[in-house]
Amino acid sequence: VAEKCNLELEFNKFHLPQYELPDDASEQTLDEYLERLALEGLRWRYSEITPEIEQRLRNELNIIKQTGYAGYFLIVKDFIDYARKKGIPVGPGRGSAAGSLVAYALGITNIDPLRYNLIFERFLNPERITLPDIDIDFCYERREKIIDYVKKKYGDKNVTQIITFGTMAARAVIRDVGRVLKMKYNEVDRIAKLIPFGKNLDEAIALVPEFRQLSESEDETYRKLIDYSRVLEGLARHASTHAAGVVIAPAELTNFVPLYKTNQGDVTTQYGMKCIEKIGLLKMDFLGLRTLTVIDNTIKLLKKRNLEIDIDKIPLDDVDTYKLFSNGETVGVFQFESSGMRECLRKLKPECIEDLIAMNALFRPGPMVMIDDFIDRKHGRKPIEYLHPSLEPILKETYGVIVYQEQVIQIASKLAGFSMGEADVLRRAMGKKNPKAMQQQLKRFVEGANKNGIPTNIAEEIFDLMSRFAGYGFNKSHAAGYALVAYQTAYLKTHYPAEFMAASFSSEMGNTDRIMVLMEECRRMGIKVLPPDVNESFTNFVVTEEGIRFGLGAIKNVGKGAIESIVRARKKHGKFQTIFDFVQHLDLRLVNRKVLESLIQAGAMDSLQGHRAQLMAAVGTAINFAQSQQSASLRRQTSIFDVVEDSGKRKVGKYPDLPIVERWSPFTKLAKEKELLGFYISGHPLAKFEEELQAFSTVSLEALNSLQDGALVKVGGIITSIKTHHDRNQRIMAFVKLEDFSGSCEVLVFSDAYEKNQGLIKIDSMVMLIGQVSTRENENAKIICREILPLTEARERFAKNVCVNLNFEDINDEMLGKIKKLVQKNKGECFFLIHLINGDQRECLIRSQKFRVSPQENFISQLRQMLGKQNVWIEG
């Protein structure tokens, strides 16, 4: 029997699902039907169809026909049409598909490839027949509905998601093995960081002398560390469902690929992405993009104000939006909100969508080294030079710098006569750095350039320039799509800040670090963030006349059913007056004791009579009261507590009295908010130290990820969690969570530092910490602690200058006399600096040589009373 069994695996054959022509279609083939839809779409997209536009479409359709992918385009159009029909937000386009005019005409993408000079052959190359790859972004909350639609249309057994394997990468395996060998964390971390990003262990041994020495060390521990790691490197450590990959087969998947059931019960392929492509199955990426949900929810909030906005028709030349980018005020703006990116934007001062596309492409490992050169050329600090005049039309928009893969393709085509398809093959060869292939391509490039009048030496220089940039040049089609989404979010933030921030909050419920970042941004923008309130809040965050009202969905232990019960009762009976009035109208199966206590502790019942301690003490009485009222109602008895007048308003009778108990202390109140919301909302324990944090912290915790590994930092905050652990010498070390106004980070306190600072390492301790940044790939930065001191001692330790602004026109002898008297009374070690400002805002700095002052609060407060708060500050 075994000898009779024969399995032959077919490669390089595609197995595409069959797209059925509609019954009312007059066309006989998919190619004809696609052509009709594309021509109709072209008339919808362009008011005038020039010969160039029509020729571009015809060329693309010919390539699609030649490669047999008409059905592929029609399948994608079908489920995108379904998404739009159901009101599910779809992204404007991502990846190389945005370079297709056919995709634009069909409504698959929303990026005009002609407007942005995008190339079809980067997407579908007749010289290199592979399945095209259209990746689509959907609203992250409703992505599953699209997958369900595709399953229903093509068969549940024909469609599934794709597996992905988490493998043991070089740095990670060193850390895992080091932990098993009980080596010191900081030593293992140091060794792991010797491995260059993207390199395996063998490459690290060849490239890094210190790493090679460790692999040959006489110390057996180091040899074991690297030897064991080399054995384990690359092995799969776990399997999970790919975040985006979906496969659609023409028949049941078991005819093409083995399947796997995950721990969560989902069915996936056993083959990963690359293997799925190799066996010719159609793979698509359905990505859930949170930003699309934010945009959609912002528009819905605007509709409540009777404001209609079509996000696809907003002007792309809005001056105020570019001002927001230029000021680096891009927290919440898609792809442009990291602290490093914000700094680059302040230098770049973008003025058009092309600047945003370029920055989106440049702000990545590799091309990042070109950012300063790009900015200097834009602002005329460096000359824009071209190796040959024919490069200018191609590189003009990027100030003479090769930024995009498409530019490499255009150079090969325009200067050396390559077809677009051949030029894309050249780009790929350059990216792979194959010496033999590169030599062959160089010869052909130079010959083609010579025919166009370009001398050999110049042609070789251009080829060298292309090959240097091709390795990390970015896909312009993808950068354009995402820059457009970024612009849309920035436009909404500029013109409808409250609605945009409310939608951003709602999308991040459950992510306390992100909520804190957004709250800090609202504070900077002057938008009030109001606590949750049973009389005003809904599930999500909403905009009110006063600001943004917290959503009840952000409170722990408060579920969807409980919120719906509260909103329903409020709509029917009006605003609640007391806890008894509130509870008697609710479904107590949904709004139980735990829900009530959570609402109280989060501050959501502050609008009712009584303070939080009273409400908490009254929960049991309120539930009993409500149960008796609801029982009476069921027995059709009239309650004296809920008589409805003819006007429809409640006539409130006598409710039970609230118990007389002591108010919670401000600290207890904030601690309970933190417990239920994940952060503080009615205040912050660090508020009294805000000046110290601004003056002496070298970085906010939210911006920590922008720093390089090993950077020295000084940060302040409150300790919110501590986990102790014994190191291999049985000494105690600690993992501490530190939080400031902007976010939080993990601090590693090794045994030496722990023993010196143990008295300060306590929950709710407010400290200033000196340490070193520790970064790992795909992880948030940590701080390795060197020293801790109380925030109360920060001024005395770190303050260097006490500064005041004096307006020249306001100065008189009386004012100077008062300042001098105050300074003489508060002697210390800080310099006293006077910024003297005249009418045209020019400034003169005067440093007192005679007087040094103390930075203590009493002195600073007296100065502020005299000169105004904004005119007095401390510098570290």
Image (cartoon, rainbow, N blue to C red):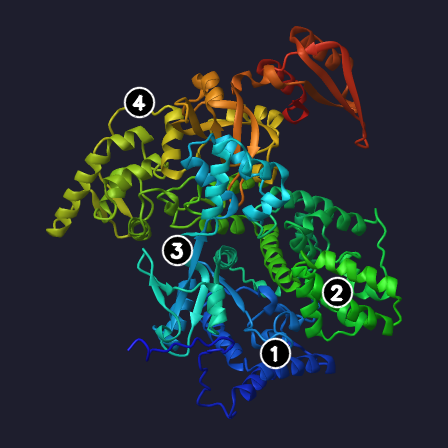
Specify whether 544 is left or right of 319: left
Front position in the image: 250 or 325: 250
Q: Residues within 10 Å of mark 1 (few under 14, many from 20)?
A: few
Q: Quadrant of residue 692?
A: top right
Image location of residue 798, percent across then percent down: 62, 19
Give the residue type at disc 3: Ala
In the depicted structure, whether residue 340 falls above or below residue 753:
below
Q: Residues within 10 Å of mark 3 (few under 14, many from 20)?
A: some
Q: Secondary structure at mark 4?
A: loop
Specify whether 650 is left or right of 376: left
Image location of residue 536, percent across then percent down: 39, 46
* Mark 4 vs mark 3: in front: 3
Q: Which residue is mark 4?
A: 662
Q: Which residue is mark 1?
A: 44
Q: CA distance from mark 2 to mark 4?
A: 84 Å
Give the residue type at disc 1: Trp
Q: Which residue is mark 3?
A: 239
Specify whether 572 is left or right of 344: left
Q: CA distance from mark 1 to mark 2?
A: 46 Å
Q: Which residue is mark 2?
A: 439
Q: Quadrant of residue 856?
A: top right
Label located before the other in sequence (4 or 3): 3
* Mark 4 vs mark 1: in front: 1
